[in-house]
Amino acid sequence: MTAFNFEQARFNMIEQQIRPWDVLDQRALDTLARIPREDFVPERYRNLAFSDVAIPLGHGEFMLKPNVEGRILQALALQSTDHVLEVGTGSGYLTACLARMTASVVSVDMIPDFTENARRKLKAHGLSNVVLHTGDASRGWGEQRYPAIAVTGSVAILDEVWRQSLSLGGRLFIVVGQPPVMEALLITRVGEREWTRESLFDTELPPLRGAAPVKTFEF
């Protein structure tokens, strides 16, 4: 039996999925090529690590697709001096990419298994600039302001707490809406009381755990 060629699959992922989705930032592409995605997926899905699918992680959660991960890294315009908040650690792969591109990452997930698995994998890859927490960050995390925030699950409405959690010049990636209409947004804080809002693309992500659902009315 021929061994699976991870390097070829990684190359194909970048050239056939991520780059055609308008991910042209070279730092983002280099990071996606450098971090071994196959090490962050559940073992039974290892050969699917580079496919255009949402890989199950357990607990009803799924790994982001590669093209979405690429768009997040590019949209946040990450700098090597940035301190990043990630809400939803999941597999830990995006966490690893964020850590490789920035000064530090605080990543929070409600599922203890995800936190522990990510801690083990990040350590194995020598990434020591990540602080992992198990907890509910669906309505913000502490009082600190961040230059970059990535929310990896969708929210029905954009809570004000996310805008307030940005430092001046800070960028927030978040997916807002309900199926079948969801929109990936980039929110940038341009003043103490002023933000810009850019629509990036339409997508569909599972809801962020703990986020408040929109009330519906029955007649």
Image (cartoon, grey):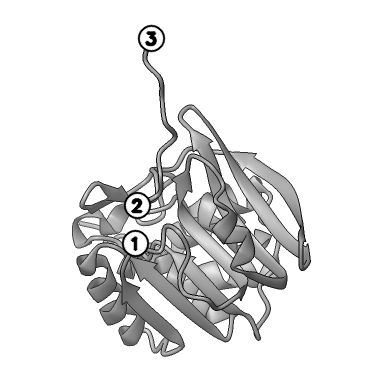
Instruction: Work out whether residue 71 or residue 219 is closer to the camera in this orientation and state it.
Output: 219
Labels 2 and 1: the sequence-earlier one: 1
37 left or right of 31? left
Instruction: Work out whether residue 60 or residue 169 is closer to the camera in this orientation and state it.
Output: 169
Mark in front: 2 vs 1: 2
Q: Residue at x 29, y 55 (%)?
A: 47
Check contact, mark 3 vs mark 1: CB within 8 A. Answer: no
Is 116 above or below relative to 54? below
14 left or right of 196? left
Q: Residue at x 55, y 72 (%)?
A: 31
Number of other residues with Cα within 10 Å of mark 1, as a class: few under 14, some 14 to 19, many 20 or more: many
Element under disc 2: loop
Q: Residue at x 57, y 59 (%)?
A: 162
Q: Which mark is residue 90?
A: 1
Residue 108 on image: x %, y %: 38, 69
Inspect the image, locate mark 3, and give the three-letter code of the amino acid beneath it.
Phe
Residue 32 on image: x %, y %: 52, 67
Inspect the image, locate mark 1, and give the three-letter code of the amino acid beneath it.
Gly
Residue 59 on image: x %, y %: 20, 52
Check contact, mark 2 vs mark 1: CB within 8 A. Answer: no
Q: Which residue matches tag 2?
A: 210
Element under disc 1: loop
Is 115 above or below relative to 102? above
Inspect the image, locate mark 2, and give the three-letter code of the amino acid beneath it.
Gly
Q: CA distance from mark 3 to mark 2?
A: 27 Å
Instruction: Work out whether residue 149 or residue 99 is closer to the camera in this orientation and state it.
Output: 149
Mark in front: 3 vs 2: 3
Number of other residues with Cα within 10 Å of mark 2, as a class: few under 14, some 14 to 19, many 20 or more: few
Q: Which residue matches tag 3?
A: 219
